[in-house]
Amino acid sequence: MTGKLLAGGIVLFALIFGIGVYYTQVYAYYERVSDTAPQAHVMLTSVVSGAPEEVIADGFEGIDAESSPIRFRACFTTPMSLAMLSETYVIHDDPVPLIAPGWFDCFDAKTIGAALESGEALGFLGQENITYGVDRVVAVFPDGRGYAWNQLNHCGEVVFDGKPAPEGCPPAPENY
């Protein structure tokens, strides 16, 4: 009888612990981004100046977390055409949307990724090194739907693996 109680206690503890871990990963750290917050200003990098410029973004919905620089996700619409955007702003060479929590239902990374691969949507460099080793990437569909996320760049991928910054990258900050 004691063995059954002990085994039951271990299973109950594991279940409660698992629920706690799931909750913290999916809900606890994320916060909604207000449409008046600085992160709600959708920026794209200009081909001419190389600097990020704000673009028209209506109906902004976003989430972010202080626990990781790559947890930012956003959805918006823009009246700007893909032709105009592609002539004015830097195209991103490898946009890969990251999965968002299921409760943030406007952002479907699989659909966005498939549209980027097929050429239906275009990916743009929003802002390079929004934080060290992380770029803001923006995808826009022909109907004006837009999505933004943070993605590791080539410097971040190497440095966050514990290796020295590769040639052409700025030196990593002290806390990395």
Image: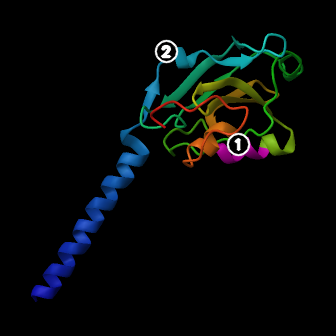
Secondary structure category for the residue under label 2: loop
Tell me what residue is drawn at x 36 percent, y 46 percent: 24
**Quarter where residue 7 is shown:** bottom left
Q: Which residue is mark 2?
A: 37
Residue count near mark 2 (Cα–Cα under 10 Å), binned few <14, some 14–19, many ≥20: few
Q: Which residue is mark 1?
A: 96
**Is residue 153 something that shows in the picture?**
no
Q: Locate residue 17, reporting x and y percent.
A: 28, 60
Residue 167 painted magenta: no
Left or right position of 24 against 112: left
Tell me what residue is drawn at x 66 percent, y 16 percent: 57
Q: Earlier in the sequence, mark 1 or mark 2?
A: 2
* Badge 1 vs badge 2, beta-carbon distance below 8 Å: no
Q: Residue 40: give its label.
A: none
Residue type marked 1: Val
Q: Residue furthest bottom?
A: 1
Residues drawn in magenta: 108-114
